[in-house]
Image (cartoon, rainbow, N blue to C red):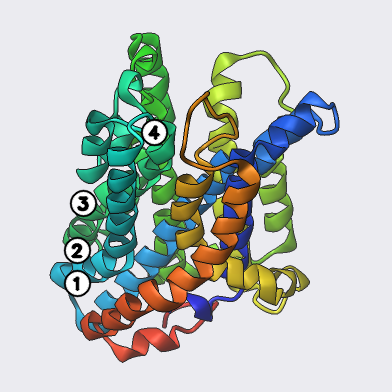
Amino acid sequence: MHRTIKGLDGIRGLAVIAVVLTHLGVFGALLDLKLLPPALMPMIHGGTGVQAFFVLSGFLITTLLIKEYNNTGSISIRHFILRRTLRIFPLYILFLIVVTLLHLVAPNITTWDSLFYAYIYSYNFIPTGIYTSLIGHTWSLAVEEHFYLVWPTVFLLLFGQYRLALLGLVLTFIVSAPLLQLYLVRTGLAAGYFVGRWTFIAGYAIALGCLAAILIGSQQTAQPARRFAEHPASLAFAALLYANSLYLTGDSWFLQNIGGNFLRTIGIALALAWLYFNQGSRLVSALEFPPLKYIGLISYGIYMYQGLFLDTGPERIPGQIWPPGPGVGLLLLVLVAPLSYQYFEKPFLRLKSRYSPSKAEANLAIGKAPA
């Protein structure tokens, strides 16, 4: 369904490229050589790529929920969970099994405590003292799965008769998340935990995507949302928010560590809404560049395997047998990710159609306000 919205696989491609280049140490090396202005780093960093994944996920999942509700008058929570399971679990579990086997022969790559958090989808809550970088990227999968255990039920309860309450709840969550993060940092919890990755904080980026979908997909707000989002000024404003590190250069800790990311994520959501209503634009055509689009199509596999083959940084300790050096790791990633998508992931993805609420989802009308 999501591929009917042109440009989104291209955004995924750019996001996962940012993650890979960050973990390869390319951006860090350019900074050291003074070839990359520090103000540009937040705009191209892998962490920003993860934020883009979150916004896209919230937008697409909520668009599907709205379509299902409009078509059937309800939401099948069971089918939703089954579709998400088929999309996420097979590759995630395969990755963890491979890491577990590697750990048995190379005990210095992770720990059993660390693996336990990954297996129970809680790596975003892991104490920093037992964090291991080989599986560090699984924190984002935990955030998404936690969010989607709650969101469909909340949506079903409120979207029909209490839509304003739903909007208010989502907005409250979005606004309160950075403030809660600041509070937790001030309590000293950040010394022992990655509090910015906790679901009820990091999930605000997913909620921004959900908010955009609700505003676009609700009869009461669709027309005003379209008038605002499709205007060229909207894209300019999105770019201004995204590039805030170029002009918000104060030494405020909140701005540099929380506020800047918050504004940048709003920019991503606004740009996504603009793309949704401007499918014939040159920007969409550029994002549809076939190699970039293909990278986006297999981006989940690239994201999972880059942790296995590259780690989350280029450093290796003496005697570390896995992962291999960055060059060999990148080669393995380029070879394995496409093969995995074709022969491992696609068979599971084909099963999702059994739990699709309506074949009409495949014909989602792009950029059209509901009647």
Q: Compute the Cα span from label 4 to label 2.
A: 43 Å
Cβ–Cβ below 8 Å for labels 3 and 1? no
Residue 24 is left or right of residue 200, and the answer is right
Find the distance from the CA under tag 3 to the CA under tag 1.
13 Å
Labelled pair 2, 1 in contact (Cβ < 8 Å):
yes
Q: Position of residue 336 (x, y in %)?
A: 50, 64
Task: State the residue at coordinates (70%, 31%).
Answer: 28
Judging from the image, what secondary structure is the residue with disc 4 in? loop
The residue carrying mark 4 is 109
Type of the residue with mark 1 = Ile
Q: Residue under circle 2? A: 156
Residue type marked 2: Leu
Residue at image mark 3: 150
Residue 361, position as x, y percentages in the image = 36, 84
Classify mark 1: residues with Cα within 10 Å, few (<14), some (14-19) or many (20+). many
Q: Is residue 66 above or below residue 195?
A: below
Whether residue 221 is visible: yes
Say which quadrant the N terminus sits in: bottom left
Mark 2 is surrounded, within 10 Å at the Cα level, by few (under 14), some (14 to 19) or many (20 or more) other residues, namely many
Of the 4 image quadrants, the one containing the C terminus is: bottom left
Distance between mark 2 and mark 1 Cα atoms: 6 Å
